Amino acid sequence: MRPRSKARDHALRILYQLDLAGDDLEAGLTSYLRHHRVAKANQPYVEALVRGTVAHREALDAAITRQAANWRLGRMAVIDRNVLRLAAYELVVDHDVPPTVVINEAVELAKRYGAPESGKFVNGILDSIRKAYALAAG
């Protein structure tokens, strides 16, 4: 797995843990990094993804909800919800990675950790978010 892909994997695991346990961001991040093998070179990127996603969670949740027809965020599987948040952060806020790469990486995470239909579900919502923000941008 490539370094940024691995970093996203770690970031997703941290976001999932924070969502399930309701842990404090700093405590959850510190605990995860202490107990899991995260390459030193990847730690800043993992932390940036997690901190950015948490900091913008309200806006990201709103963007996801607008595009998730007939789905409330609370009804989504915890893993799907956090894959969507992480990818939406990269699509809407960070802009460091091309949208097609962000969506492909998110679909792979959803397939790896989610239900059999998670990949398609995540792909559809993220593609709608990408299109909505592309239209808004210009």
Image: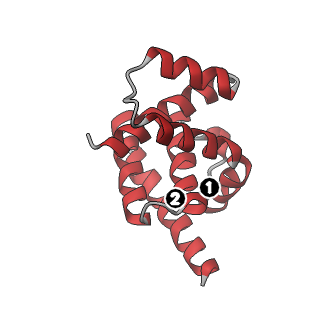
- Residue extending farthest top: 35
Residue in front for this viewpoint, 57 or 63: 57
Q: Who's the residue at 61% across and 22% down the image?
A: 28
Residue in front for this viewpoint, 137 or 2: 2
Amino acid type at circle 1 is: Ile
- Tell me the distance, in whole angstroms, between the alpha carbons under discs 2 and 1: 7 Å
**Quarter that holds the C terminus:** bottom right
With 52 as the anchor, is 9 left or right in this view? Answer: left
Q: Position of residue 17 (x, y in %)?
A: 56, 25
Residue 64 is tagged as 1
Q: Are marks 2 and 1 in contact (CB under 8 Å)?
A: yes
Q: Who's the residue at 58% across and 26% down the image?
A: 29
Above or below, 14 against 88 in this view is: above
Callout 1 secondary element: helix
Packing grade of label 2 (10 A; few <14, some 14-19, many >=20) is many
Q: Position of residue 47 (x, y in %)?
A: 54, 37
Q: Position of residue 6 (x, y in %)?
A: 35, 38
Residue 125 is tagged as 2
One can see residue 81 in this view: no
